[in-house]
Image: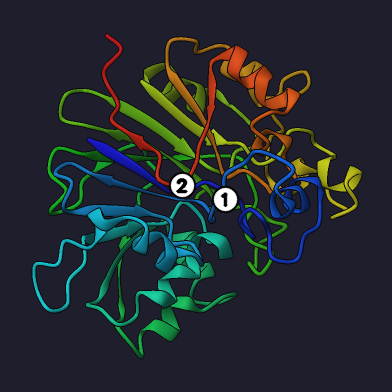
Amino acid sequence: MRIVVLGAAAGGGFPQWNCNCRNCSGFRAGTIRAKRRTQSSIAVSSNSTDWVLINTSPDVLTQLAQTPLLQPARAIRDTGINSIILVDGQIDHTVGLFMLREGKPLQVYCTPSVREDLTTGNPVFNVLSSYCTVNWHPIGLDGSKFTIAGIEGVTFRAIPVESKAPPFSPHRNQPTIGDNIGLMIEGSEGEAVFYSPGLSEIDSAVAACMDRADCIMVDGTFWTDDEMIQQGVGHKRGMEIGHLAQSGPGGMLEQLGRWPKARRILIHINNTNPILNDDSAERHELERAGIEVAYDGMEIVPRRLG
């Protein structure tokens, strides 16, 4: 099994187009050492030719251009994209579907509640019915594994996680199971990856997945819960929008300390997060803990820990 990080940033990317926070202005001025990052998405394959996209960000065309593996060029019109899994209905995970409208029908796997959001509050699927169309494959929430034709030797399992439905969702303030999922991704040699870019709580089901995982790729959105407030770029705390901060008691950094043998990677990183600065004290703290920060183009070939 092979995983490529197509985009490692949260909504807006890094630097964000209209933001002049310390990170964004420092990147443009060349006064901090950091990598440009597009909005969050990964791709999974078992043969390095046929790929499952997990989320399709608004930056998908840039991501495809930067990832030749996803354009095998076997015919006059071709793509390495076999199918798409959506872990939620957020704009930064779904708008890229519009960019893929010139091809064959899109094979999209998501939960019933995400499908509802994408046919009502933000009717992406309805719009695409006039172009390539969407073939919806429901993701069950009973803990059973599912496979995708053409992606041999890889299984997926949805884990409902605590987070938030999108702001446009009819049930934004009445969460339903399936609004947000993490994914257990397992390869033919028993290797396992737990992926959850939006995560506000590590409950017993999530902890059990992390116990099993050889690689943990989880929410790296904010360093502190009040990060956007302190920097003057927003008025909401991280937990209000479904993200567990890395620092502080019970934060992601402390939580990930429970799995020291697994490869641990933070993804979906907000432009305000100081860990984007390679030389920041916060980045060094992660490095001392053995926790990595995802970047565009990062490749992961998970190996069984034993």
Residue position for label 2: 296
**Residue 136 image point, x, y percent:** 31, 67
**Residue 148 image point, x, y percent:** 20, 51
On residue 94, the disc is: none
- Residue 101, compared with residue 206, is above or below; it is below
Q: At x 50% / y 71%, what residue is drawn?
A: 118
Decide: few, some or many residues near mark 1? Use Cα within 10 Å; few <14, some 14-19, many ≥20.
some
Please indicate whether residue 58 sits to the left or right of residue 129 in the image.
right
Q: Quadrant of the N terminus?
A: top left
Q: Amino acid at mark 2?
A: Asp
Q: At x 25% / y 61%, what residue is drawn?
A: 81
Mark before the other along the chain sequence, 1 or 2 = 1
Residue 90 visible here: no
- Residue 147, compared with residue 20, is above or below; it is above
Residue position for label 1: 36
Inter-mark Cα distance, 1 to 2: 8 Å
